[in-house]
């Protein structure tokens, strides 16, 4: 099905203490960071505040040209939030940070700093300032919630906004299963519940993907996500339907819990990537029992931001397998002129407002809450049990989410969308959690809390507005008092989760955010690196590290005895398009959404 994985140099590091990736040097009285063959200067002036602007906070940031660590000012102007910085060598840069200052303040009030850096597993010693010392180091303030495990950089597409793929990188990175096992064992040193996303490139390019999944389960990984564009499943649908179902079932039985699938829009013009293939991918999933799919749109201003509401409706139509939609405002990598960035830049706040407008305000901006709200829940459970909990204390600007209940009509098309905030007092419940957490920390009676909780929890639910078939009060009781977490699964299957994750780039970089990141990458040299260091500072992290464990393209071609990169691996839609267009499965999938 796919070309066998390349044999990589067996450079596994077995030592428990990893050497720092960087060091400080002084030259002519100036301080530099030496890392990955580069020498990067430090320091610069704090940019001024100008007329009509209101100061919000100061952070550390990076020069988009040289990655110099410099002060950044975050400020308000004309109802929006911006970040400004000045590099002594490359001048001033200003970038949109958050598209709505009122929403910014609402999100920031839920800020949770977590337990502090001392409670996070440090894999290496301190040598240089954040973010040049990643691995994790003792400056980091959050454990790993989701680890990205790169299994290949080969891909059957070449999307212009992709972080990396083999042709762009100039090498093939495809580690052995034992090298991947080592990376998982590095993660296990944190002693937290393991959730891993198998990613790439396109993981389906590996012929031993089922074995990779089995290895993760052998190592005790609790939750396995497969990040894919889904095209391979559609190809198999037409090439060999029985094999498609059998192979997908093998992935599920091996341990894949969730498919994290790219989906940028509902129309073929917007979603040129996999619009035609998704209906057949879904059909294979249904037959194989793969019933947890997350749609992942990369949101780009002026390209697909007018279809966000329709993406939610599409997910609602297929809610038997679609559990969530996770929007990702685009990270603008590379050197770009300001006008070009302004043409494409969209923030979480902007996307939230687009969704409100495109759903007739059935999902209003106030229905969304930032990620650290989850930390409020975790700290309450920790106070109750005395057992350290999975605590997502990310920066509020990193992401947001909500749950919605979908009412459907003819052909399964959503007729009404009811956010959780419509019938549940989220703010009041958060205040209750904090109050009762303090109550527990004071050593007061758990029995009395249980009795009081049975009365209190009902106050937060408006049963007149609660959708039929959803016993939300009972669910709350099971989760927060009985600690029956199967109830969370029930919520996840009765409602659809909507999320936002805005990964940074060099223009809007905020070191405060990266220090609280809990989406990390494992690396073959044993480190665990935050997402927005790994992919944004790619020349000193992702590309620099992976190239050392790679096969160059010429050697890869010689091994396969081919002249071009890898013939047959790039997807050729022309072989399937006519059959897809005329197939009833395709028409039914989009019926009521685009026609």
Image (tube, grey):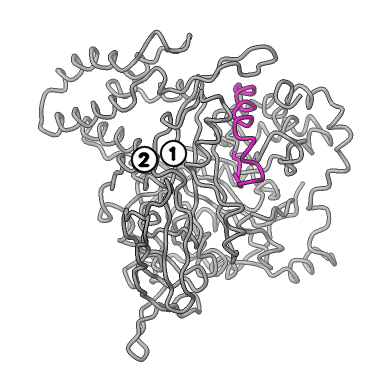
* 170 or 393, nearer to the observer: 393
Q: Position of residue 254 (x, y in %)?
A: 59, 36
Please tell me which residue is depicted at 46% across the width and 27% down the height of the picture.
403
Of badges 1 and 2, the one in the foreground is: 2
In the image, 284: left or right of 415? right
Label 1 close to label 2 by CB (< 8 Å):
yes
How far is the residue under mark 1 from the one under mark 2?
Answer: 8 Å
Q: Position of residue 431 (x, y in %)?
A: 24, 29
In the image, 393: left or right of 401? left
Task: Answer whether residue 427 is visible to the viewer in this image.
Answer: yes
Q: In the rendering, which numbered label is found on residue 400?
A: 1
Quadrant of the frame with the C terminus: top right
Q: Relative to residue 444, is residue 502 depicted above or below?
A: below
Q: Which residues are magenta?
A: 296-319
Kind of element beneath mark 1: strand
Residue hosting label 2:
107
In the image, 313: left or right of 115? right
Q: Relative to residue 366, is residue 177 depicted above or below?
A: below
Kind of element beneath mark 2: helix
Q: Relative to residue 448, is residue 341 depicted above or below?
A: below
Check disc 2: other Cα within 10 Å, few if <14, some if 14-19, many if 20+.
many
Please tell me which residue is depicted at 83% across the width and 65% down the height of the picture.
564
Check disc 1: other Cα within 10 Å, few if <14, some if 14-19, many if 20+.
many
Please tell me which residue is depicted at 41% across the width and 68% down the height of the picture.
132
Q: Position of residue 168 (x, y in %)?
A: 68, 64
Was residue 86 drawn as part of the magenta stretch in this picture? no
């Amino acid at each position: 099905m796919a070309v066998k994985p390349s044999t990589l140099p067996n450079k596994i590091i077995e030592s428990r203490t990893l050497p720092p990736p960087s060091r400080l040097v002084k030259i002519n009285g100036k301080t530099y960071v030496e890392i990955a063959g580069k020498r990067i200067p430090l320091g610069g002036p704090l940019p001024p505040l100008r007329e009509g602007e209101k100061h919000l906070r100061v952070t550390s940031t990076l020069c988009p040209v040289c990655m110099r660590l410099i002060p950044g000012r975050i400020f308000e102007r004309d109802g929006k939030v911006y970040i400004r910085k000045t590099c002594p060598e490359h001048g001033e840069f200003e970038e949109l940070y958050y598209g709505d200052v009122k929403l910014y303040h609402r999100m920031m009030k839920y800020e949770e700093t977590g337990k502090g850096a001392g409670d996070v597993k440090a894999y290496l010693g301190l040598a240089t300032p954040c973010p040049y010392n990643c691995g994790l180091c003792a400056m980091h303030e959050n454990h790993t919630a989701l680890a990205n495990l790169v299994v290949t950089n080969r891909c059957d597409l070449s999307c212009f906004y992709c972080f990396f793929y083999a042709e762009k990188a100039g090498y093939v990175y495809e580690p052995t299963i034992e090298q991947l096992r080592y990376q998982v064992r590095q993660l296990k040193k944190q002693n937290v519940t393991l959730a891993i996303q198998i990613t790439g490139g396109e993981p389906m390019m590996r012929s031993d993907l089922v074995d990779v999944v089995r290895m993760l389960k052998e190592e005790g990984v609790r939750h396995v996500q497969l990040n894919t564009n889904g095209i391979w499943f559609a190809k198999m649908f037409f090439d060999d339907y029985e094999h498609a179902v059998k192979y997908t079932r093998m992935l599920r039985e091996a341990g894949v819990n969730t498919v994290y699938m790219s989906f940028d829009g509902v129309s073929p013009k917007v979603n040129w990537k996999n619009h035609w293939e998704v209906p057949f991918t879904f059909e294979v999933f249904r037959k194989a029992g793969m019933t947890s799919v997350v749609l992942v749109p990369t949101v780009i201003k002026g390209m697909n931001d007018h279809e966000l509401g329709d993406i939610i409706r599409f997910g609602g139509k297929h809610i038997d397998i679609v559990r969530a939609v996770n929007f990702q405002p685009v990270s603008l990598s590379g050197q770009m002129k300001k006008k070009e960035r302004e043409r494409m830049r969209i923030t979480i706040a902007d996307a939230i407002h687009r969704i409100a407008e495109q759903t007739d305000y059935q999902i209003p901006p106030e229905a969304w809450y930032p990620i650290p709200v989850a930390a409020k829940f975790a700290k309450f459970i920790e106070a109750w049990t005395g057992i350290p909990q999975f605590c997502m204390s990310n920066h509020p600007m990193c992401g947001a989410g909500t749950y919605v209940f979908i009412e459907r009509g003819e052909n399964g098309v959503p007729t009404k969308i009811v956010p959780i905030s419509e019938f549940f007092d989220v703010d009041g419940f958060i205040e209750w959690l904090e109050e009762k957490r303090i109550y527990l920390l004071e050593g007061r009676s758990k029995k009395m809390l249980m009795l009081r909780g049975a009365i209190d929890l009902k106050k937060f639910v408006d049963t007149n507005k609660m959708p039929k078939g959803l016993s939300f009060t009972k669910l709350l009781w099971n989760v927060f008092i009985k600690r029956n977490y199967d109830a969370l699964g029930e919520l996840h299957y009765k409602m659809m989760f909507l999320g936002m994750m805005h990964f940074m780039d060099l223009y809007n970089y905020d070191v405060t955010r990266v220090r609280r990141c809990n989406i990390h990458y494992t690396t073959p040299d044993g480190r665990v690196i935050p997402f927005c260091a790994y992919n944004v500072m790619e020349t000193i992290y992702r590309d620099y590290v992976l190239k050392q464990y790679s096969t160059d393209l010429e050697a890869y071609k010689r091994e396969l005895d081919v002249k071009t990169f890898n013939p047959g691996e790039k997807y050729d839609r022309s072989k399937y398009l006519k059959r897809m267009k005329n197939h009833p499965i395709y028409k039914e999938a989009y019926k009521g959404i685009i026609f």
